[in-house]
Image (cartoon, helix red, strand yellow):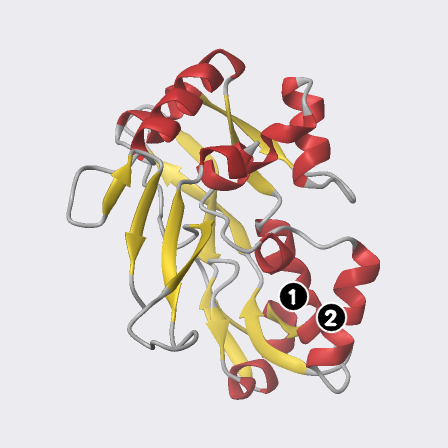
Amino acid sequence: MYFNYIPDIEYDVKPVSYPFSTSDFVIAKNFFRRYKLNDRATQALYYDKYTIEGEERPDTVSFKTYGKDNFDWIILLTNNIISPLNEWPMPENALRKYAETKYDDPYSEVLFYETREINLPQVINTDLSEQKRNVTILEPGLKVSKQFYLGLYQYFDGTNVITVPGSSVSRAITAYEYEERENDKRREIYLLKNSYIPTFIKEFKKANNYKKSSDFINSRLKKTGV
C-alpha cells in the first residue's frame, strides 16, 4: 500500500545511442521524497504507547492493532523508522549473533561502569514530629571510571562517614548488556489510533503530490535529468 502513495519520477539515462543528445526516460518511485509529520500528528492525544513483544514485526503489529498487516508503513513512518533492519528491535537469537559479530567477546567485554542506587533512611524534623524518609545518596545509572569501580567510595549516612568498595556501589556493563538495553529501547513505540488512520493516509497522499514546476508532468509524476 505504501508504494501506491509514493509519487513517480521520470529520469533520463545518458548516453543511450546515436544521436547522444537523445535521452531515454525511466520511471521509478521517488524514494528521495520525505514526509514530515505535522505538529498536530505529533501530539500524544493521537497515539497509544505500545511495547513490541518477542519477535513481532511491523506487519504483525499492524494486524494486531488495525486488523490489517499492510499498515506497517504507517507504524514505521510515525515512529521515524527509516531502516527497520537496524531500528526495529531484534529477536534474542538475532541480537546475540549481532553482538557476537560486532565484539570479540560481548559477554565478558566491559564497555563502561555505572553506579548502583544507594538509599538511606534519614530522620527529618518538622515542627510537629520526626519523620523517617529514604534519601538517595547515590543516583543509579551514572557512568563512572574503572578507577571508581576498583577504588573506595565514601558517603555520609547522617552520623558517620562510611567507606565501601567502589565495586559494591557500581557495576560493570558488558557489551551484550549494553546492546540488549539499546534493543529494548527500540521496543517502546507509539501507534496512531485507529480512528485517525484515514486522515493520516489522506494527508500523506496529498503531501506526496507534486506542485507545478518546470519538471512537472502531473501531480504524481515529474521529470528530471541526471
Q: Determine contact: label 2, label 1, CB under 8 Å.
A: yes
Residue underneath mark 1:
179
Q: Which amino acid, by three-letter code, is at mark 1?
A: Glu
Rounded to the nearest whole Å, what is the CA distance between mark 2 and mark 1? 9 Å
Kindly give the residue lying farthest to the right in the view shown: 93
Residue underneath mark 2:
98
> What is the secondary structure assignment of the residue under circle 2?
helix
Residue 117: x %, y % from top left: 55, 57
Q: Which amino acid, by three-letter code, is at mark 2?
A: Tyr
Of 33 and 198, which appears nearest the observer?
A: 33
> What is the secondary structure assignment of the residue under circle 1?
helix
Q: Residue at x 65, y 22 (%)?
A: 65
Of 36 and 17, which appears nearest the observer?
A: 17
Kindly give the residue lying farthest to the front in the view shown: 18
Residue 166: x %, y % from top left: 58, 77
The vertical placement of 151 against 122, above or below, is: below
Of 223 and 55, which appears nearest the observer?
A: 223
Of the numbered discs 2 and 1, the one sitting upstream in the chain is: 2
**Horizontal placement of 155 versus 152: left or right?**
left
The vertical placement of 38 against 98, above or below, is: above
Q: Residue at x 78, y 44 (%)?
A: 55
